[in-house]
Amino acid sequence: MSEILSISELNNVIFSTLKKEKLLQNCWVTGEISNFKHHVPSGHWYFTLKDSKAQIKGVMFKGQNAKVQFSPENGIKVMVRGSVRIYEKDGAMQFYVEEMYPSGLGALYLAFEQLKKKLMDEGLFLDDRKKPVPRFPKKIGIVTSSTGAALRDIINVARRRNPGIGLLLIPAAVQGQSAPAEIAHAINIANCMTTVDVLIVGRGGGSLEELWAFNTEIVARAIAVSEIPVISAVGHEVDYTIADFVADLRAPTPSAAAELAVPLLSDLQDGLQKYREKILLALKNQIERKRFRLLELERNDAISKPLWRVEQKRRDLEKLTKQLLTGMTGFVSDRSGILKLVSSKLDLLSPLAILGRGYSLAYDSHERVIRSIKEVEKNSEINLKVYDGKLKCRVADIFADISNE
Amino acid sequence: MKKSRPSPENFENGIERLEQIVLLMEKNEIPLEQALTLFQEGIELIKSCNKSLDVAEEKIQVLLEDTNGEFKLTTMEKDKE
């Protein structure tokens, strides 16, 4: 009979045996999740991992499960790394998971939807976060694999559109485990260490698994914080990745990205030619307008000959002066006759002569001539001027002439 | 809102100013001297913009990082283009 073990000893042997088996201490395992429980106070995950024939209990503690990029659900396939251990106290054997990833299409789609919702809720896909792609870039940055077809396509299209455009490659793996970190890092150093005006980030076509790096959070966030505008260029027209949602502009393919980033040289040259024509025409029009106005002014006499009125007047004056002079000479030769006539006329009109004929002039006390009875009051003092002197009188009575009213 | 990087000075600013000049010259009647000055400026801008487009084909640059975190800017070999 061999040794009789206690239960503790038995479990201990199992424990040590497991510990000695290197594979069981660190292995990758794939299986479907069921009986998933997220334990609330502790934050630990308890579940069963199974395939069609067998299953094993699993646990993932809070410290590790916090890093998992998606929320596992029953029925989805996962890929996990961890170790097998026995809990000596109850002999229960469990797979202790340290890393967990979605596996298989179903799991990938789930992870995709979960991350998409999470980032959308943060507002990372909003239109007003998107920066405009520069119209006239001098240098284009490219984040892609140095060996892939995408790089070749981008270079060909870019050079064809403008041979002088600057191109700078920041190489990064675009599939596999290291891809997400490499792509994110490339975007970051493009921002810190280069002077490119726009970044094209992408890769050629492939399966969902092959494009997976562009659906990871680390790449999405690197694009989101990039100060250089980012054009995403992943796969084919039908492929939409999270990178496409976060980017400032989505291109359906890498070639299309080059078309979006690089303006046609001929377009730029044509544009400049148009400006040349426009300003030439504008200058011509400005000059024409001025010339027209000048012509109008010349036509309008009033303005082109500002002194014409004076001229007119001067001419009239000359005519009159001539007339006057001829008139004057006639006048002077006939002097004696006219003068006699004029002087006798004047005589008749002279105030003294009028007084001599018997008329008198009435004045009030203010030396004002009295012309009407209305200007005088009864008993007031008035003066009478006669031919040879002055009489001081008092108004005895006033009578109105009816015929003179 | 994130701030965007400064765009290439010569060409983009040149186009903006040209757009302005055209607007000014096409608007109403402006003093002849101003029209001539703007015209002059426009022609000069078009000349310099055209010049900046006359860039020769450059080699493709590659930014590489070694294991020490040091960066090196090289050009791509001809056969890879």
Image (cartoon, rainbow, N blue to C red):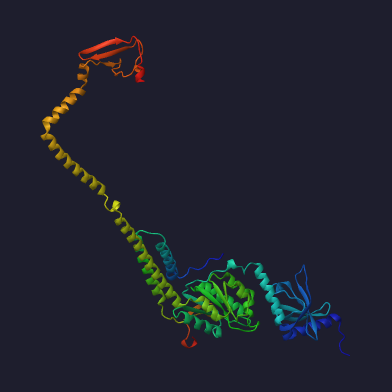
Residue A60: give x, y in percent of width and height. 74, 75
Q: Is residue A81 visible?
A: no
Observer-nearest residue: A113 or A308?
A: A308
Total label count?
A: 0
Which residue reaches farthest right?
A1
Observer-nearest residue: A355 or A161?
A: A355
Q: Residue at x 30, y 56 (%)?
A: A299
Quadrant where the C terminus of chain A is found in the figure: top left
Which residue reaches farthest bottom?
A1
Observer-nearest residue: A290 or B57?
A: A290
Left or right relative to A130: residue A81: right
Q: Quadrant of residue A282?
A: bottom left
Left or right relative to A58: residue B42: left
Residue A187: give x, y in percent of width and height. 56, 75
Q: Quadrant of residue A64?
A: bottom right
Image height of B56 relative to A388, above or below: below
Quadrant where the N terminus of chain A is found in the figure: bottom right
